[in-house]
Each structure stands twice: as structure tokens, then as C-alpha cells.
Image (cartoon, helix red, strand yellow):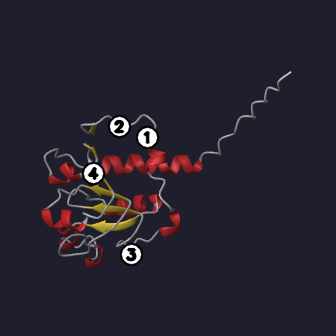
Amino acid sequence: MLFRSDPVPARCRVGSIWAWSPARRSRSRSRSADFILAAGNGVTDVKLFLELAEALGAAVGASRVAVDDGRFARSQQIGATGRTVQARGYLAMGISGAVQHLQGIRECRHVLAVNTDVSAPMVQRAELTVVEDVQALMRELLALLQAERAAPPAVSSPPIPSLKAA
């Protein structure tokens, strides 16, 4: 279920939302990455999360809770006690959005969130929130991305002949 006060433009689709520049890919250097995929306490399947980050060409970030639990390296922590990041796109997966974390992403241009708690501070900060179980959504996104990459390229239609004035 999507949660947003404004309607989502009809032209948005998974393939176009994640069209960030692959030239700036880096899973370890998240400070100025184009796109950051960040994990919080809601992410329990770290292997799946990392596969999704790789498929999206995203830098990896994490909340303090996920770092303190040992699921991610301290260098990947985003927030007042970690790194402050600047990204064109930031996707928070299962991050509630403690004030320290929100300070760390204040320079991010577009923030998207996936969370089951609609009252979480991250939901208030995000431009678009998907209210869904993080693991289920990660599996579906990864399957869509893999299917899109496996599909043959679309055949373009022949050009429309121009009409010449008589």
C-alpha cells in the first residue's frame, strides 16, 4: 500500500524510479552517492538487502540500531553519530527515523521509506512511503529487477512516415 498525501504521478514505475547513474556506484562510499539504500531494524535478511543494493547499484547505509546489532559495519552508519550523507535518492528500509538519523540525511534530495509504522518519523520525512513488510518488498523488487534484466530488449516500432505536402 502506498501512503502519500499527494497523488503519485502515473508515469512513475519501478524501472524509472531506480534509474540512478551507475557510474557513481559504491557500496562503501555513501557520503556523496547518487542513490543510497539504507537498512534499519526492520531489515532482518541482510543477504537479500545486499543483493538488492547491488541490483540497484546503490551505496549501502544503515541505522545505528542495525550497526549496533552487528549487521553492518560502523563505516556504513548514517546519522549524527555516523556519517552525514548527500544523495539524490535515499531509500530507507525499515528505519523508524530517530532524530540523529534524520540529521544525517537532511542533505538528501529525495527520501523514500518502506515501513509498517505510518507514525514513524521517517514516514513524515519521506516524500513517498510504502507501507509494507520490508522483507517481502525487497524480494519483490529484486525479482522485478532480475526479470527486467533478463527480458529481451524492447523492439522499437518503425518510424511513422512523414506526410509530404502536395
Query: Which residue bears the numbered disc 4?
Result: 113
Q: Residue 101 placed where, x, y %? A: 19, 65
- The answer to whether residue 144 shows anywhere in this view is no
Query: Which residue bears the numbered disc 3?
Result: 29
- The answer to whether residue 143 shows anywhere in this view is yes
Quadrant containing the N terminus in the rendered view: top left
Q: Residues within 10 Å of mark 1 (few under 14, many from 20)?
A: few
Which of 165 and 139 lies nearest the eye of the viewer?
Answer: 165
Query: Which residue bears the numbered disc 1?
Result: 12
The residue sitting at 44% across, 45% down in the picture is 14
Which of 7 and 50 lies nearest the eye of the viewer?
Answer: 7
Tell me the mark number nearer the camera, choosing from 1 and 4. Answer: 1
Give yes or no for contact between labels 2 and 1 (Cβ–Cβ under 8 Å): yes
Kindly report the distance in space between the C-alpha atoms of the residues bearing marks 2 and 4. Answer: 14 Å
33 left or right, relative to 80: right
Q: Earlier in the sequence, mark 2 or mark 4?
A: 2
Tell which residue pokes out farthest to the right in this image: 166
Q: Secondary structure at mark 3?
A: loop
The residue sitting at 30% across, 73% down in the picture is 76
Q: Residues within 10 Å of mark 3 (few under 14, many from 20)?
A: some
Q: Residue 78 placed where, x, y %? A: 25, 70
Q: Earlier in the sequence, mark 3 or mark 1?
A: 1
Which of 22 and 140 lies nearest the eye of the viewer?
Answer: 22
